[in-house]
Image (cartoon, helix red, strand yellow):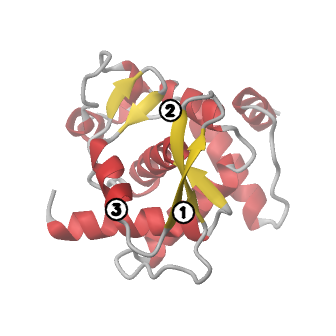
Amino acid sequence: MKASDDRKLEDVIRFLLNHHTFLHEKRIQKLVFLADLHSIQTRGRRLVEADFKRYYHGVYSEKIALALQSLQGVDVRPDTGPDGAPTFVFLRPKKALPTPHITREDRKILEEILQAYKSLSTEELAQVGKSTLLWESAEFGEQLDYDAYLRDPSSRLTPQMKKAFEVAIEERRRGRPKTYATVDDMVADSRS
């Protein structure tokens, strides 16, 4: 990963932290992954150059873990995750962290992700990631194959997920954002 890619990844994480009271690493991992997929769906290119692997609790990127460890100006505290495992919580900074390496288009992608998934638990976010064809094409512990995913549109999000995302984005544009208890509820609503 180039230095500019590292800075952009850090800015994506800062953007997420600026918009949440707190975030656990696991949720950050899932949000960055889903934002990356949304960027591919809508722009045909990745948001970040982070390698993700398939693991039990969903996608995981060592690059994101390392970026979180090196972030400056962030209050980090030991915590217990929703699953009872020890983790770290990243708290919203008192003053918004600068994000000079993300574009207006990048911000739009991130805002849409935050809107679409704000009501989902981290476990539900993990399930959304696990429902993608990119996830399904990899074996446990194996790196997800973005090259094939970018070349072959049939390997992208399922039609139901794409439709659900489009409905959520349209509702936000109309000023009527909806929240859902589960991903299944979001998909079911998009069918009606």
Earlier sequence position, callout 1 versus callout 2? 1
Residue at the image position 28 percent from the left and 21 percent from the top: 141
- Decide if residue 122 is on the left or right side of residue 15: right
Label 2 packing within 10 angstroms: few (<14), some (14-19), many (20+): many
Give how far across and how far down residue 135 sits, in percent.
39, 26
Residue at the image position 54 percent from the left and 55 percent from the top: 77
Looking at numbered disc 2 in the image, what kind of residue is underneath it? Answer: Gly
**Element type at mark 2:** helix
Count of numbered badges drawn on the protein: 3
Earlier sequence position, callout 2 versus callout 3? 3
What residue did someone put label 3 on?
9
What residue did someone put label 1 on?
16
Query: Marks 1 and 3, Cα distance to the nearest angstrom?
Result: 11 Å
What residue did someone put label 2 on?
129
Looking at numbered disc 3 in the image, what kind of residue is underneath it? Answer: Leu
**Which numbered dot is residue 128?**
none
Residue at the image position 37 percent from the left and 66 percent from the top: 71
Quadrant in the picture for residue 4: bottom left
Residue at the image position 61 percent from the left and 38 percent from the top: 80
